[in-house]
Image (tube, rainbow, N blue to C red):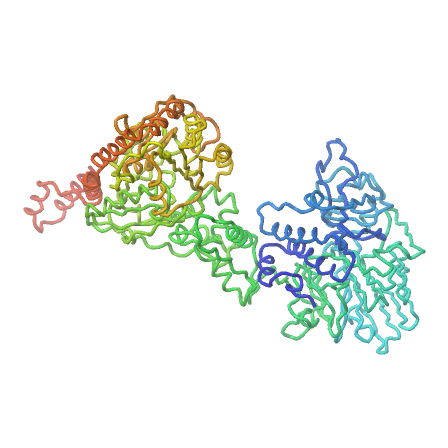
Amino acid sequence: MLTARDLGVPVDEYLRMATCGTSAELVQAAAPLLVRRLLDSCDLVVHLGPDTVVLAPLPDFGDGLTLVPRLLAPLPDDGRHPRHVGGFTENFVAVGRDAAAFVDFWADRTRADLIAETPKGWATDAAALFEHHVDRDPGLGVAAWNLHERSPSNVRTIDLTGHDPTQPWLAASNHDRVLLSEHPGWRTLYANLSCTPHANDRRTPNANPAHMPVANGARTANANSARTADADGRHTADADDMRTTDANSRRTADADDRRAMDANGGRTTHANGMRTTDADGMRTTDANGGYTAAADRARTSYANDAHKAEGDGGRVTDGEGGRATDGEGASATDEEGARGLKADGVRAASVAHGPADDFVRAADAIGAGTAGAEVVRAAEGQVAPTADVGDVLAGDAAGRRMVYAYDGRAVYSDGSRARVVSRFDTFGPDDEPITPTMREVFKDALRAAAEPDPLNARPKGLPPHPFDGDGSAFRAWLTEPASPAQRASGTNRLLHGVWQSRIDLRAAFPRPLDALDPGFRDWCARHGVDEGVPTWALPGTPREIAPPVNDFGVNVAGYHTAELGIGEMGRVLLDVVRAAGIPHVSVVDEHSVLGTARTGVAAPASVGRPKYPVSLITVNGDFTRALLEADPEVGHGRYRIGLWAWELEEFPPTMHHFGQVDEVWTVSDFVRRAIEPHSPVPVRTVPIPVVARDPVHDRPRRRGEPTGFLFAFDFNSTAGRKNPYGVVTAFQRAFPGRTDVKLVIKSTNAHLHTGAAERLRLMAADDPRITLVERYLSAAGLAELYATSHAYVSLHRGEGFGLTVAEAMARGLAVVATDYGGTSEFLDARVGWPIPHTMTEVGAGWPPYQPNARWAEPDLDAAAAALREIADDPEEAHRRGLAAREHLLRTRSSDAAAAWLRTQLDAAHRTWLARTTPPPRPPLVRAARRVLGPAAGPIRHALGRVEAILDRR
């Protein structure tokens, strides 16, 4: 008995594989695992696909890898289909022990393909990666796509992929190069195959194609062999098949099958002349030309019925896959009996899949068992968990033993039948179906767990599979929200998967996670169950959105733990709010930046539910909706202020998300001028403060002491805009051959932008003076980097504010920066080295900036001259550095920012109050009410109408 561990796969991993794939997909993934195991005891294994039928003896194969081409010549240019079929078939491969490395690759690839969004397959890559032999025998790998170049009278194996027995007039759908009406030979062969039991019995119209009864301690033959021998060699029959059994095994007659067996006569003859077997196992002959196998000292099994060879080769039991007929109905017999899969003491086996529900399979050439046979439940690649054949052939509550599964029907040893469902198609005590959407959601989670995340060291848990216990863990996982927005809207990961899988739902409900838009939730409640959504996965009630309190205060929402520019800007304003003594709550969004930024900053102590009537949303406009869906209380019923940044002069339409906010704050007048012409709401410039830092150098650098230059940026902000390439070029142009200078370029997220990072690496590769630091640093590590530098260089092409430039100035470093963007508002020639520029088009390849937009191209000669001046005149560099620090701290103080913020937030609060507080009654109306007192009806009614009109005004 084989278990998953016998195949080298932990049980949980195997069950995750079963969750990912359909029955057919799982069989393909498990096949190489079984092949690998069979190679422990066999010299050769032949793998046949689930739709492959063996019609004639197979040739000998070598000890390595043998592949079969799909075509022997290029497809004709005749306008017919198919027009492309690939290189090698994956439904026929012969593997010897010399091909062990290929089998490992095959197993890894098929398992990866179970999870992959776009499976790669293995045959083409195998041909390139491994030594192999190409068997161009025209009788191998015959299929609908190559009938035009093959002969129906010379078919060893035929692949029926695409053949539909309900449309027997076609070899395969969408294949019109060879039409059966024009080719009698192929017509006859396909007609025979369409009504004859073969590898994939789901095509057979026979309701009872094969039985496999089981006696105590029985060895099990192949699923289509319709024959089982017990441990003493006696034959046991299925009463439903109208077989009679002689208890002494002298003779068994099958009235329906017209088969007679003389146990002592050494020969079994099929009454219709189809098969004759010599009792010493030396020769097996199919009277219709099926195949002949030499079995001397060989346990031989091939074709997709996975035949079982017993003992040391004394008898070979043949299944139904060995019948051969040529296209005209002719038959052939190998008289010599020398042609077989492998002979002369070489042990061989075959692996074949069979129909999806045919889950009782003999595991050939692994070694005979004693009480139980080595049986693999291969319908979906499932291997039996125990060592007793009785456990493999699972019984139901009545104790009946299931011995054969065909097209969803089970045949039991007592002759009864029942409808069965494959274990890996359902889960839980109620046999709930595992839907395609469940599988896709599960695979998405596995892919996410497997994706390396160098930014955050948090462990990624694997999703639970449905075959553990009663499946409740799997069900609970599917109904969990996978994001804050799902949690807020009352939906879950399964419902989101349903929405993603259907284009009609995406079109009808473009905002399924909006807690204020019930459209998708209503569809789920009204129609979801009818369309396959389990009742336990229906949406819950969205989280209650609490109204704001009337008190003055602000909710500051943003990426407060993320190490990126807009996250840092949010933390700056949160610090100002705190310093100003303004009541506040901070709302942290991490989900939106997972995978693109490290979230290593400690969350603020003021984290809580947004309760104030004003919300300051410190994310750009294109991310505002996502934050509001994740936490609807940030926006609902609140006055919303968006803190937006942009880096070029033109604010593109793709960034116009003005409907999400009541006003926009920007980080510089440069950004305000870009946004304001397009905005229907007020746009204001925040006087961004700069935190005071101790100067890194208390004296000028000594002449002759090496000069250190620094630049820091995030590849997510685009290397094209940040322009580290210009920094390297200016540095190398300024100091050809000099060894008293060095340049450090510190970056983050290079792994997400390989092309841009490689360009920079190659520019610096041959210059030992340049160091690239490609990682996040702690605050202490970053401070050390500034402390070991003397100047900061930013030759940007666009900048909204310039946080790193301001940080360097606050530390007293000499600064060289392009005279463009937000930096030009606090850096001039008195306090630094502004670099002139010309305006150029952005060009392709730097999203989100449009190719026809314009940005600055710094003058690199001027930049090189500035770098030389800093290196050659340390006193001037030190003087301007200190001047820059003093200028910045004076003009960008936290006190000034706090005063501005309080003024603006107070105005926003008053606006909110005006919106939500009913206007006071006009004096005349109040006076009339006092005079009228309890006066009756008509006059009070008329007064009420006047009040209503005034309210509308």
Residue 6's place in the image compared with 436, above or below, is below
Q: Where is residue 667 shown, x and y percent of the image? A: 29, 35
Residue 87's place in the image compared with 414, above or below, is above
Task: Please name whichever residue, 679 or 39, is drawn nearer the observer in this view of the structure.
Answer: 39
User: Considering the image in quadrants, where does the C terminus appear?
Assistant: top left
Give the tally of numbered discs: 0
Residue shown at 33%/52% (left/top)? 602
Q: Quadrant of residue 225?
A: bottom right
Task: Please name whichever residue, 870 or 807, is drawn nearer the observer in this view of the structure.
Answer: 870
Q: Quadrant of residue 797?
A: top left
Q: Quadrant of residue 605?
A: bottom left
Q: Where is residue 810 shown, x and y percent of the image? A: 27, 38
Residue shown at 75%/41% (left/top)? 145
Task: Please name whichever residue, 165 or 784, is drawn nearer the observer in this view of the structure.
Answer: 784
Q: Is residue 914 visible?
A: no
Return the residue found at the far left.
931
From the viewer's perspective, tell me whether residue 436 is left or right of residue 85. left
Q: Where is residue 119 shown, x and y percent of the image? A: 62, 46
Residue 265's place in the image compared with 382, above or below, is below
Return the residue found at the far bottom.
248
Task: Please name whichever residue, 334 or 524, is drawn nearer the observer in this view of the structure.
Answer: 334
Q: Where is residue 546 shown, x and y percent of the image? A: 28, 53
Q: Is residue 607 visible?
A: yes
Return the residue found at the far right.
335
From the viewer's perspective, tell me whether residue 298 is left or right of residue 35. right
From the viewer's perspective, tell me whether residue 690 is left or right of residue 629. left
